[in-house]
Amino acid sequence: MSLIRKSLVAAIGLVATTSVAAMDNEAFEKAFDTLRNKGASEQLKALQDLRYRWTMESYPGWATYEGYPGVNDRWTDASEDGIERRQQQTRRMLAASRHIDKTALPENQQLDYQLLYQDLLAEVKGFQFPEHLLPVSHMDGIQRNIPSVLNSMPRRTLADYENILARLEKLPALVSQTRALMQKGLKKNITPPQITLRDLPGQIRALIPADPKQSPLLKAFAEMPATISNNQQRRLQQRAFALYHKELVPAWQGMAEFVERDYIPGAKVDTAFTSMPDGLRWYAHEVRDNTTTTLSPEEIHRIGLAEVKRIRTEMDQIIRKTGFQGDFKAFTDFLRSDPQFYHTDKEALMSGYRDIAKRIDGELPALFGTLPRLPYGVKPIPGYSEKSQTTAYYQPGSNEAGRAGVFFANTYNLPSRPKWEMEALTVHEAMPGHHLQIALAQEQKDIHPLRRIGGYTAFVEGWGLYSESLGYDLGLYKDPYSEFGALTYDMWRAVRLVVDTGMHQLGWSREQAIEFFMNNSAKPLHDVTVEIDRYLVWPGQALAYKLGQLKIKELRARAEEQLGSNFDIRAFHDQLLGAGALPLNVLESRMDDWIQSQSTSAAGTTAKPAQAGHISAS
């Protein structure tokens, strides 16, 4: 699976189609021919152009989010032939990158080459593992992604609606292809853990209610623009409803029955990812891929234990500050159960998030010299997926597509949505977390479009977690309970290092992981259970948050130490975000160069007045 796609889909909830598609061979070869007989710089630019076009045409759902034209009428080819063709094309692009003389590239293209080559190499290395046989889980898959893609499509003109209908017509074929991959996975014992699939049939059936007007698949036909005449609207709706009853309901109903009858009963019972064929090597690959480090699972486990111990000490200090009489467990039970910490209706919860977001926005210029132009909104997670969805996620917007970014908050089961977590969550998902970082990357004008859409989980989520610590600078966490909430969120990501590696590498059971999480966090049991099941189906992904945060904090501490009074937090943040998302090794090298340049500049600035004063005194 593409590193670009995987990092964004898994890390921040960006919804795309479920498997890597591709241009057909004729189109690919024609584009590939443009690489020939060029100098190094032109070769690199042509390969970037090809990779960008290939990515957008390979991921039609993602292209919709990005506002890329011409592919809104199609889905991904999820057949095994299509998957094999795309893998071969990726290998061709990797080989082409190796033939570029990187020593002949100008300085401003060195980073472009490094990222392109590193991404292609990581993707090709991943082909040794049959990830395509895991196309569906309770966290992602066509039952989750298809409605979001459809509901993000333009719906202004008759042509827009023809595209929506074209996608609906092609949807049964995609369902069939996905089911075939799941069946092959069953035969090879490559499935998500059985325990995590309990909500999957309900997620599928939620797409096909008796009334088509209530289906998430047909939301575009509920309210249609005035630019389309009433007669045209009726014809479009009639086509959609007829297609729904004749094609879509049977396809999805068949998938739900297959999941209940065959997939869940046949799914592997062992929850460890390493229990699958070649699982140890596969998990090690997932760890490297998601963290962009060379740390082993055992090393990460030890880092996690140390972070849990550190954060727990700070939490105990906050408990003493509140004057609470009782131990850590008693205090977390109090936070989980006392009515004062919970909203009693969903709209109040959403209003609370919007209020926090507005308060944050006014404080951002003190920490950032450059802010994105693209706005964002705050919305509830759709009802068809809220039960098994995490606490919140961010969905990127697009100026090209005319769509704002969205911070989605979960309003399911209000007694599991405490007020004391809301500030940290908003900082992470909206501003200055995901929206600021991703929108800034999208708005970069001096980098190739390929880099604007790219993402690395360790950077993207590391920045989101680091942003939570900026809540203090933004005037948040003034209440000791919200301060404890911020520490709970930091602890949440530290616990991930322990339980993810524990379950997949060190033999921990699911129950052990839940117990460790509950003993070291104030997160409610529902949230903890959802989180643990997430780590079971996205092995290694959750490790990236804390490791990315620790690297950013390390770089900031290094800059503060070396620059002293010349350290400028706005300049530091602008430099950190100024090249888009980067692997951690590349980020460290870039920031070290910047620190050195700032040190040299500061030394030159201070040297001149000293010299002038000496001359004047003489």
Image (tube, rainbow, N blue to C red):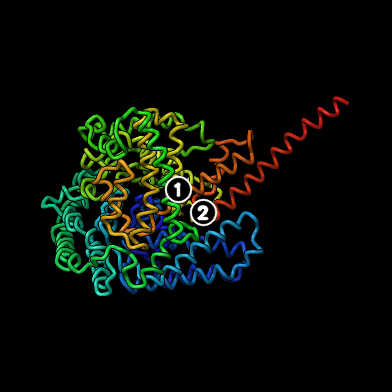
User: Residue 286 at what x, y percent from top left?
Assistant: 41, 62
Q: Nearer the viewer, residue 589 or 360?
A: 589
The secondary structure type at the circle numbered 1 is helix
Q: Nearer the viewer, residue 66 or 162?
A: 66
User: Residue 123 at what x, y percent from top left?
Assistant: 45, 65
Q: Is residue 478 above or below residue 530?
A: above
Looking at the rendered structure, the kind of residue marked 1 is: Gly
User: Residue 97 at what x, y percent from top left?
Assistant: 55, 67
Mark 2 crowd level (few <14, some 14–19, many ≥20, 10 Å Cα)? many
Q: Residue at x 24, y 58 (%)?
A: 196
Query: In the shown orientation, is residue 326 left or right of residue 303?
Result: left
Alpha carbon separation for disc pair 2 and 1: 10 Å
Mark 1 crowd level (few <14, some 14–19, many ≥20, 10 Å Cα)? many
Q: Nearer the viewer, residue 372 or 592?
A: 592
Q: Residue at x 47, y 50 (%)?
A: 548
Q: Are marks 2 and 1 in contact (CB under 8 Å)?
A: yes
Looking at the rendered structure, the kind of residue marked 2 is: Leu
Mark 2 and mark 1 lie on one chain; the one further toward the N terminus is 1
| Whether residue 35 is visible | yes
Q: Residue at x 47, y 39 (%)?
A: 372
Query: In the shown orientation, is residue 118 left or right of residue 185?
Result: right
- Occupied quadrant, residue 328: top left
The secondary structure type at the circle numbered 2 is helix
Residue 462 marker = 1
Q: Residue furthest top?
A: 617
Residue 130 marker = none
Q: Which residue is mark 2?
A: 584
Q: Residue furthest front?
A: 326
Q: How many marks?
A: 2
| Whether residue 166 is visible | no
Q: Quadrant of the N terminus?
A: bottom left
User: Residue 486 at what x, y percent from top left?
Assistant: 38, 37
